[in-house]
Amino acid sequence: MHESLAPTRIDRGYRRLALGAVLVQVCVIILLLRNSYFIAEDLYLPGLLAQLPWSAETLTRSMFGHLMPGFVAVWKAVASAGTLSWPLVGVIIVAIHVALLVGTVRLFTALHGRRWWVPLAALAASLSLALLSCVVWWGAALAPGIGAVAAVWVWDSTVRYLRARSAPRLLAVLLTMVVAMSFGERQILTPVYILGFILLVGIAPLSTFRARWRVALGGWPAWTAMAVVAIAFLVVYFLGGYREDSGSTAPASAIATYMGRSLVEGYLPSVLGVLPGSSPPILGWVAVGIVGAFVVFTSLKSVRSAHAWLWLLIAYVLCQLPIAVGRVGIIGVDAAVDMVRYYPEATLLFWIAASVAVSAAPRMRDVTRQRTVIAIAAVIAVLMTAVWAWSAATISNTSAGVASKRFFSQLADPSSKLGAALESGEVRMLTVPLPDKVISEGMYPWNLSDRIYPWVRRGTEMTSLVEGSLMLNKDGSGSTPMFTTIHDVAFFSGPGCTSSDEQPVSVLQGRLTPKLVGGMVRMTVSAKDPAEIRVLSRRPDGSTWPVDNQSGPAYRIPSGVSTLVVPVAPIAADLVTLRVEFGGTVCVTAADLVRPVYR
């Protein structure tokens, strides 16, 4: 009777733990989402991609030097709502991380069976800092987020196919690999990790190298399916000019420095819940010591564990080398080491190796020693969970999404005072560059408010006239625009007047450089009748082009005296002029270079 009931009890306990893990996962993700909002390219990609048709060309366009058709497809689907909805993407992010947890539970179960610790190990992997750091940024939740999640499902599908070969499982391998590759070409390494794991560690305990080799050879249909997908993506990648948009390659010395420092200062501390760059350095070294002790202890107890840790070291080098080559030259070694969202795949590989070490550990016959080890492990787990909770709270409270949520709070809320004023048509929002903490100035012209506000609040009316307009403050409220003057760059060359049948009038003379980011030309103009004007800049080659580098509609000014502000593109110029496109005489009585002040 006891033997017949044992499997049922194990199944019930396993399922309860798995369900509890899902509930914990959902609660943590929701808590992180409550404190964040769209940032950086999240704010302009809807406007950019909404202009493009659903086509192969659109899906395969370069995204920051990457081939990510899945990323583009999800963004276009979200943009079809016509507005930026944080609740909508929040639901998607929760679904992504539930899929991560479920996939990890399935993978660990396929490798080790229904052990009581499997849901807990999967939860620890899913709630690692590298993956939580992607929650607070929608773009990162998609890539590398979905790519890492899909990679886990590639693992699960492959392991299950190798255990019991069937057409449906082979199809699962193919489809999950397509999804993984569509969110970043880095996932091409996933089959390499799996093959290395099969040969060095094996999917069955106590397997010899010859047995592992036979398993690897027998899985040739799976390797072929993944290779076909990978080669197809590589062909598109190398023929599509993506490498030209990927930035500069770091020197060999910087790459080597990053690979060494990231291992002990970023990667290993983060897998145990220590946040690099924010936590005291001593905590990082304690985490490294704990991981090192665990590696040595389990390696001495089991050869299979030693193989698993050797495999992890090799896989870590392969995983982080593309980061070192592609990102270190752009942001520097220090920033790259502390960037925990650069470690999602490597973190999941760590927990795969750790699960092997736990599974392969022999049962201790000495009860007293066994209890001592369990007690030490429990104390370490409690302490590191406390450190992890502090790190997760730090990620939530210090992410750029916090400032962005505050900045857009009233604009996105129709019931706010600002929302009501905009709804009534009493005011319009001024077109200005947004704060660098919300979206980088280097993303010009997509950092301009007229590209973003209508997506935060549908129907927001924009203007370039200071009179009757508002600017957002850091706390989300609206107020009269304020500017600070940029001195010693360009000088007012007026006053002067011109009309549609006359030559442009000079406004500013001096030196506008590509480093003049966030600058605007502010002009006081007067006109007897309404007119349409363009503000032009003269380039070093003698050509003229709109000073904002945009070929859109001309600026409309009313009759009387008004103040116009026009963003300056970060392109070299030495003269700014005003040309009347339509209307009577327009006079410029004052002009200077300014930046908006966010209070």
Image (cartoon, rainbow, N blue to C red):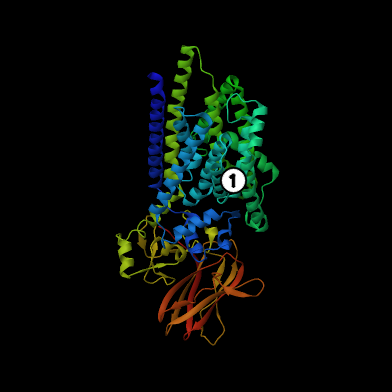
* Residue 209 on image: x %, y %: 66, 27
> In this rendering, is residue 437 above or below 296?
below
* Residue 269 on image: x %, y %: 53, 33
Q: How many marks?
A: 1
Identified by mark 1, the residue type is Gln
Task: Single out the residue that lies furthest toward the bottom.
Answer: 501
In the image, what residue occupies the spot 42% across and 31% down? 386
In the image, what residue occupies the spot 48% across and 59% down? 76
Q: Is residue 315 left or right of residue 153?
A: right
> In this rendering, is residue 106 above or below 70?
above
Task: Single out the residue that lies furthest toward the right.
Answer: 252
Depth check: 468 or 362 in front?
A: 362
Binning the other alpha carbons within 10 Å of mark 1 as few (below 14), some (14 to 19) or many (20 upward) gives many
- Could you tell me which secondary element the residue under label 1 belongs to? helix
- Label 1 belongs to which residue? 187
* Picture quadrant of residue 460: bottom left
* Residue 332 on image: x %, y %: 61, 46
Is residue 344 visible in the rendered image? The answer is: no
In what quadrant of the picture does the C terminus appear? bottom left
In the image, what residue occupies the spot 61% across and 43% down? 333
> In this rendering, is residue 501 above or below 181?
below
Depth check: 435 or 136 in front?
A: 136
In what quadrant of the picture does the N terminus appear? top left
Depth check: 371 or 446 in front?
A: 371
* Picture quadrant of residue 6: top left
Is residue 19 visible in the rendered image? The answer is: yes
* Residue 238 on image: x %, y %: 67, 55
> In this rendering, is residue 249 above or below 479?
above
Q: Is residue 457 left or right of residue 484?
A: left
